Image (cartoon, helix red, strand yellow):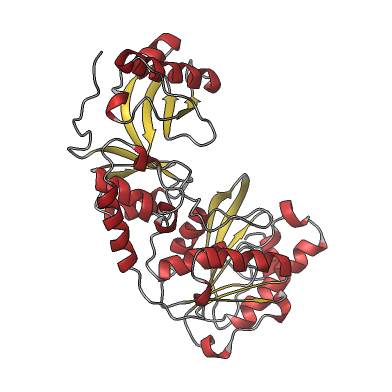
Amino acid sequence: MSRPTSRDPFRNARPLYATCDSGMGDLVAAELTALGADKVFPGHRGVGFFGDRQTMIRANLESRIANRILLPVAEFPATDKESLYAGVRRVEWSRWFSEKQTIAVDASSHRSALNHTAFMGQVAKDAVCDHFRDQTGERPSVDKRSPDIGINVRVDRDHCIVSLDTSGRRLFRRGYRRESGDAPIKETLAAAILMRCGFSPDMVLVDPMCGSGTFLIEAALIATNTAPGWRRATAEGFGFMRFRGHDSEAFSGYLSDLDAQRTPFRPGSIIGADIDGAILEVCRRNLDRAQISHLVKIDRCALHNFALPSVVADGLRLVISNPPYGERLGRGEDLVRTYTQLGALLKREFRGGEAGLIVADDAPKAIGLRPEQSIPMRNGSIDCHLLRLKLHATALPPKSGRR
């Protein structure tokens, strides 16, 4: 019976792939380049790059926008069950993990003869298990809910790429948000919007409809140079922490370095408000779990009553918000009234500043301001736009018939 090799698969830089939401590839590419990745090339919903083990770890903990980091281990043509099984079985799985660990396979298909993803996942799972049976006489167990090792099988135009999921659960799960309101925005999307809008620690950031506080928390993490995966690393962890060769001692040192790199930030420069007292209590608990409640000021307040504290009234101001869409609030007078009040607030309190609003349909016309940019995106299953507005000293009227 053969024994798994101890040769380190990361002895040289190797291909990696960061998945992301549509339209975010350029931001993820910039992040990865700053983290030391080589040969970075953005795509439609992901970014390819090369890196060593440390680059892979940094991408998981320090990228604010990527959804997960995949590590390709095989590529081959796959047009039927036999070719898929053979290709997956050839992978030296025992170099990466042991038969004592649990696995789960997720599969996807695009314009391929193999298009039944549940069947593809079953075939790939059997191939992995049979590899270990040949190596050790034992087969790993399957755990679809919380596996030690995640395996991704993607067949695109009959070409299969098999990858290890180095992230485990998706990276937007930072660990601080256990509760949310209706149609919450993902943490990764919130961070991307903040970056699109040019947020920096010298700004006063306001979300007058803050809900469970995702924008506020992501802004505080950016402002304090806190790695978004730092808290999660000490809680549920990441997929790569269960790979062979993971050095727990070196990883602990890296986490200590990340903690030391966090920077001070003046309290009161990130401000949130919401009319719903119950959701503000959820927001407070999320702030506490993120360990940044001392940096963020939140109050219960209706849009038409919101006023900036005088101490920040002259600062560089950025308004970021995910106001209700028609899908959540209805399409009648309530929706128009909300956007009208939001527009009045921007004109009254934030002239000279900027705003980024996530909107859908034609309701933004009621804001009464002309956006400088409208960027298509998706918030979950909802098609929407990020409207970027410069709030001039004199409000500009909306263009007729356009957002």
Q: Quadrant of residue 271?
A: bottom right
Can you see residue 392?
yes
- Position of residue 346 measured from the top left corner of the image (x, y, whole percent): 62, 76
- Position of residue 342 measured from the top left corner of the image (x, y, whole percent): 67, 72
Q: Choose between 244 and 324: the one closer to the eye.
A: 244
Most extreme residue toward the top is 82
Locate the N terminus by quadrant: top left
Q: Quadrant of residue 14?
A: top left
Q: Quadrant of residue 349?
A: bottom right
Is 301 left or right of 349, judged from the image as shown? Answer: right
Q: Choose between 11 and 193: the one closer to the eye.
A: 11
Q: Choose between 119 and 350: the one closer to the eye.
A: 119
Is 67 left or right of 54, judged from the image as shown? Answer: right
Most extreme residue toward the right is 333
Rendered position, 135 above or below 143: above
- Position of residue 301 measured from the top left corner of the image (x, y, whole percent): 70, 77
- Position of residue 173 measured from the top left corner of the image (x, y, whole percent): 50, 50
Rendered position, 156 above or below 228: above
Q: Which residue lies at the image location 43% right of the left edge and 62% below the top edge? A: 195
Q: Which residue lies at the image location 80% right of the left edge and 63% below the top edge? A: 334
Number of numbered labels in the structure image: 0
Locate the C terminus by quadrant: bottom right
Q: Which residue lies at the image location 38% right of the left edge and 23% below the top edge? A: 160
Is 162 left or right of 328, judged from the image as shown? Answer: left
Q: Choose between 53 and 251: the one closer to the eye.
A: 251
Q: Which residue lies at the image location 51% right of the left edge and 30% below the top edge? A: 143
Can you see residue 89?
no
